[in-house]
Each structure stands twice: as C-alpha cells, then as structure tokens.
Amino acid sequence: MLTAHVPFIIIFFVFCIWFFPLISYMAIEFIRCKNYYNEINGILENLEKKYLLPEVVKEANFIHGEKLNAILKEVSRDMHENVKYYRDMQLDYREYIETWVHEIKTPIASTKLIIENNQNEITNKIDSQMDRIEGFVEQVLYYSRSNNVNKDYIIKPINLDNVVRNVIKRNYRDFIHKRIKLDIQDIDEIVYSDGKWVEFIINQIIGNSIKYSNNKEQMIRICLIKKTNSVILTIEDNGVGIVTKDINRVFEKGFTGENGRKFSKSTGMGLYLCEKLCSKLGLKIGIESEVNKGTRVTLVFPLSDMVTFESYL
C-alpha cells in the first residue's frame, strides 16, 4: 500500500491543515455561545420583569444565533400585542364603569329628591340606605381609577380642615343616629395633594370609625401633628378595635377579618383603596388598634419631595 510508506508526520500535518481551522472555528463559536448564554442568565437574574428579556438582551453573534434572534423578536412582538390588547380592555372597562357611575347618579339623585319632598320615618331610613349606595358607587369609581391616578389627580394646596368638615357633612346622619361625639382639634393646615382623592380617603377612614362604633359613649377624635418635614393627620375612635392577628392584613384587597364577619358590613375594599391611593399620591397611611379600646389611623402628608417615611416617625 502507498499510504504505508507515507511518514506519520506528513499525515498529521495534512490533518492539521484540513481540520485545525474547523476545530478553531467550532471552539470560537462555543466560547461565543457560552458567553452569550451566561450574559442572558445574568440579565435574567437581575431583571425584575422577566418578560422584558427580549427588549434588553443583545442580538446573538454566533452562527446559529440568527434563529434565536428571530424567536426573541417574535416573542417580543407577541408580548407587545398582548399588552396592547389587555390595555385596551382595561381602558374599555374603565370607560364603561365611569359611564355607569355617571348614569346611576341620576336615579339616585331623583330618589333623594323624592325622599326630601316626602319626609317621614320610612323615607328617612331609605335615605340612609341611599347614602350607603352612593358610597359604594363612589368606591367603584375610585377603584376603576386607582391604577391611573397620575392621569386624574391635580396637586394643589388644600386645607385639611375644609376636607375633614366636608366628610363630616356627608356623614352627619350617621353621627346623629349613632350619637357619636366629634372632637375636631386644630387641623387648619395647608398641604399639597389632590382634594377629591384625599377626601375619599378620609371618608373611608371615618366611615369605618362610624361603622365599627360600639354602644358606649362613642367618640371620634381628629387632630393634627406638624413636624419639620411632614403633617400628620390622626383619626382616632373608641370603637370595637381590630384583633391583633388581623391588623397586618387590613390593607389587603378583599380582606374583611373578624370584624367583617361579625358585622357583615365590610367589603374589604375601603382600606385597600386608601393604601393604594396614598401610595400613588406620595402619602403614607398607618393604623394601630386594640380590641374594645379603639383604632387610630394616621395620614402622613410630606412637606418636601425628599422626605422618607422613616423621618416622619
């Protein structure tokens, strides 16, 4: 055989000439591929919203990376289409809710006018229930807007005393019916926020104080503490209080707790909306309570954009 007389060194040299470039190329591709996937893993670990990976990752630069690039682009395009679809659905739902709220106010106003013109014990009770319906309708409206507060609010100077007294006027029947004493201390202070949103929040808090009042001498005390960087509005009652195991969950959506089961009046949405709207408005809300002694809710209004909640305490 002819090949038997060819020196091994020549065979090895020919092998290197033919296969070394291929092996080198494969090694380079492997290193590129490995570095790319390591980079992706690093990005993925630090990325809070994993679905945004196709938006932030660089295009692959190895030979079979073109297929991966195409897949990531397709995933990104599909994600954007789905986001747009659900955003449009949410917008349609919100517009429907706002239209419904606007329409439902007409029969409510008509009913209250009829009641006003036919005052008696029965119509007064109906009027009280109509106030509750108005409250639930308002809650629905604010819930539908809670994800887009920044598009609805107008930050301007508001007087806390005026806001609180508006809430008291809205609930005067319940104060009279339940004989709740009201102690409003000096709260004549200007803060910067959205008046209607703050009024809704305070109305939910005072509404809870009324709802969960007990049968002894009932009182709601409203006072204000002014600090260097903040104004703290405190609303305190001597009602039934909240059990310890429930206190850390009162801001959860739909949570009613022991009081909700006992009184059968809670939707679990009021304080949830308060906390959510406070977060959007840059306010802080806190709650303390003791069973059979009462509940204290605090609203913290910052006087500076550079203030953190820890500095309020």
Image (cartoon, helix red, strand yellow):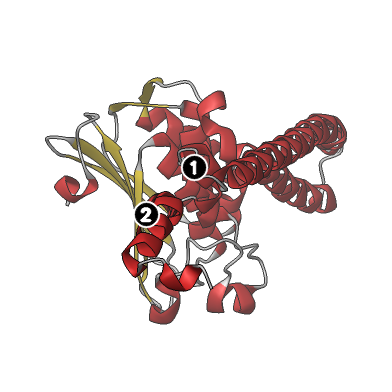
Mark seen at residue 132: none
| Crowdedness near tag 2: few (<14), some (14–19) or many (≥20) residues, C-alpha within 10 Å | few
Say if residue 41 shows up in the picture.
no
**Residue 36 x/y as whole percent:** 41, 50
Q: Name the residue located 55 percent from the left edge and 79 percent from the top edge.
A: 258
- Residue that carries the numbered disc 2 in the rendered image: 31
Q: Nearer the viewer, residue 19 or 308?
A: 19
Q: Nearer the viewer, residue 240 or 71?
A: 71
Q: Quadrant of the N terminus?
A: bottom right
| Total numbered labels placed on residues in the image | 2
Q: Name the residue located 83 percent from the left edge and 39 percent from the top edge.
A: 115
**Hey, which residue is sitting farthest left in the picture?**
228
Q: Check disc 2 and report its element: helix, strand or loop.
A: helix
Closer to the chain start, of discs 1 and 2, is 2
Q: Name the residue located 35 percent from the left edge and 73 percent from the top edge.
A: 293
Q: Is residue 153 above or below residue 2?
A: above
**Residue 282 x/y as whole percent:** 36, 37
* Location of residue 189 by image quarter: top left
| Crowdedness near tag 1: few (<14), some (14–19) or many (≥20) residues, C-alpha within 10 Å | some
Q: Amino acid at mark 2?
A: Ile
Q: Nearer the viewer, residue 193 or 135?
A: 193
Q: Are marks 1 and 2 in contact (CB under 8 Å)?
A: no
Say if residue 139 shows up in the picture.
yes
Q: Is residue 188 above or below residue 72?
A: above
Q: Is residue 240 above or below residue 221?
A: below
> Looking at the image, is mark 1 or mark 2 nearer the viewer?
2
- Residue that carries the numbered disc 1 in the rendered image: 60
Question: Could you give the CA–CA distance between mark 1 and mark 2, rounded to whole angstroms?
Answer: 12 Å
**Residue 22 x/y as whole percent:** 46, 52
Q: Check disc 1 and report its element: helix, strand or loop.
A: loop
Q: Amino acid at mark 1?
A: Ala
Q: Name the residue located 60 percent from the left edge and 63 percent from the top edge.
A: 268
